[in-house]
Amino acid sequence: MDKTPNNKAWFLVLPVAVLVAFSAVIPLMTVVNYSVQDTFGGNQFFWVGLEWYEEMLHSERMWNALGRQLAFSAIILAIEVPLGVFVALNMPKRGFWASFCLVLMSLPLLIPWNVVGTIWQIFGRVDIGLLGHTLAALGIEYNYTQDAVAAWVTVIVMDVWHWTSLVALLAYAGLQSIPDAYYQAAKIDQASRWKVFRYIQLPKMAGVLMIAILLRFMDSFMIYTEPFVVTGGGPGNATTFLSIDLVKMALGQFDLGPAAAFSIMYFLVILLISWVFYTVMTNLDREGR
Amino acid sequence: MTDLAVNAPASRTRGRVNGKALVMGLYLTFLLLPIYWLVNMSLKTNAEILGTFSLWPQNPTLANYRTILTDPSWYMGYVNSLIFVVMNTVISVLVALPAAYAFSRYRFLGDKHFFFWLLTNRMAPPAVFALPFFQLYSSVGLFDTHIAVALAHCLFNVPLAVWILEGFMRGVPKEIDETAYIDGYSFPRFFVRIFMPLISSGIGVAAFFCFMFSWVELLLSRTLTSVEAKPIAATMTRTVSASGLDWGVLAAAGVLTIVPGALVIYFVRNYIAKGFALGRV
């Protein structure tokens, strides 16, 4: 749709600008402020320039957390996106069963994140959990509080459980928007099932799938509550992702300077990657209409 | 023929439909099994949970639920959560409506940059904001109030609401606006009387999402409250660390947190799919 140029539209945006300025800009400036200063306690701060940034850039702790974080985000995207699309392709198209599946699939999305953690904490325990108990009965050694691999598997399966439905619902919405005529044309051309998927369904889903990938990337990159409840970042530091590390540093040890520098770099990494996704997405949007 | 995606002879169609049902069955089982286990736990006593392993409660008891519903320190957690979630939903949708209209109808100085900047707030990790929020709200005397959490959650809900509403508003033809102005409607009257009813499903979806993300968030709501406005999520984490092993009550509290979400989802079930696509389908 062509839009009318009109700078008075700023007045309509003003409430949002004021509110977000209060809840985002002021806090962010505090963080920037801390990141360039040091303190000896009390309220005495002095300027240290980019020292904290330099320290954090050479800190093995941060690089390790970043590495784990990238691995985690990559793994869950690699599982959730194909699985979500697959589930969406298998969903009933309309009628009672469609609503039924929609409601049940949305259920995990509305569970508070710490309860998600609690659910899997209980579910995975060897003594009282169905999963842990079954695995133990099958003779598989599994203990997410002590074994790093088991902890990773638990956290990843939990995230797949929690968020695959989001990808599936988005893909489903994309599929629903394909007119029947497309399928009829494909049928006349005797297109195979794979060709229908590759040349009709996938292109039509591309836009929503980008939203799905963007949302999943952003949220997995700042995951905190669920792994914190299940593993507490352990065993050792095996599941200490960026947010967990940051909270430990800022609220636990009160290392304001390094934590603030960490925050800023963390934010910039998310911003950079999301910007790439967003640009691709808006380009797709433009082509689509 | 409703399912035209299946371009196979009738004999194969049958097999494929069953295959689909099988996939959905397996997936839904995977989703519901952990939830079932939580419900199962919540109906047992602690002795039974730790003593015997059974797939369903041998002596079902509602004692855990009774503990929660009679103890104010538990049930006030739900009340507090609901208060700030509703406040946040109302604030987010109210400020997002005019902004989304501006983005969907007008081109103005810096609109694209401003829109992306709004989205960056959705991308901001709450962990980054936890400490500054704590200091900001303490210094203005809002610490441990419902409005503090509601405002803090605006950080990620307002951008999301703007994004969703803009998607829905884009689908309304501009001629409607122009016709209304020719008919002599003023902007506010047009907006409330004509435009809002047209995008009511979008408003519903946006409200649903604000509700959802505010309801599930823990880090900020826990950091910004101590007693008066403590959300149920924080109550749960503290009980875990304090008494350690009260699995039954913990499970019951978990089950009760799922209920509001399930209720809300039932009402918006027909718009969920479109809403998750942020109105862009």
Image (tube, coloured by chain):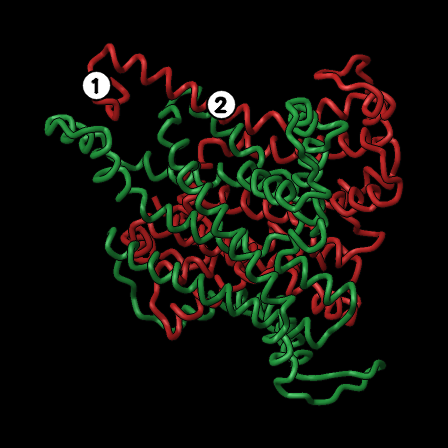
Chain colours: A green, B red
Tell me if B15 is positioned left or right of B255 in this view.
Answer: left
Q: Position of residue A240 (x, y in %)?
A: 66, 55
Picture residue at 67% right of the left edge, 63% below the top: A246
Picture residue at 69% right of the left edge, 79% below the top: A34
Q: Position of residue B225 (x, y in %)?
A: 79, 56
Q: Nearer the viewer, residue B47 or A94?
A: B47
Tell me if B92 is positioned left or right of A187 in this view.
Answer: right
Q: Quadrant of residue B15?
A: top left
Instruction: Give the letter of the chain under mark 2.
Output: B
Instruction: Give the letter of the chain under mark 1.
Output: B
Amino acid type, label 2: Leu
Q: Quadrant of the N terminus of chain A?
A: bottom left
Q: Quadrant of residue B211?
A: top right
**Residue A145 badge:** none
Q: Nearer the viewer, residue A97 or B114?
A: A97
Q: Position of residue A205 (x, y in %)?
A: 32, 42
Do the residues marked 2 and 1 share a common chain?
A: yes
As helix, strand or loop, the secondary structure at mark 2 comes to helix
Q: Nearer the viewer, residue A43 or B278?
A: A43
Whether B106 is drawn above or below B211: the answer is: below
Q: Earlier in the sequence, mark 2 or mark 1?
A: 1
Q: Position of residue B272 (x, y in %)?
A: 47, 37
Amino acid type, label 1: Ala
Picture residue at 87% right of the left edge, 23% below the top: B47
Please indicate, yes or no, whether residue A178 appears anywhere in the rendered image: yes
Which residue is disc 2 drawn over? B26
Which residue is disc 1 drawn over? B8
As helix, strand or loop, the secondary structure at mark 1 comes to loop
* Count of numbered circles on the image: 2
Label 2 – label 1 distance at C-alpha: 24 Å
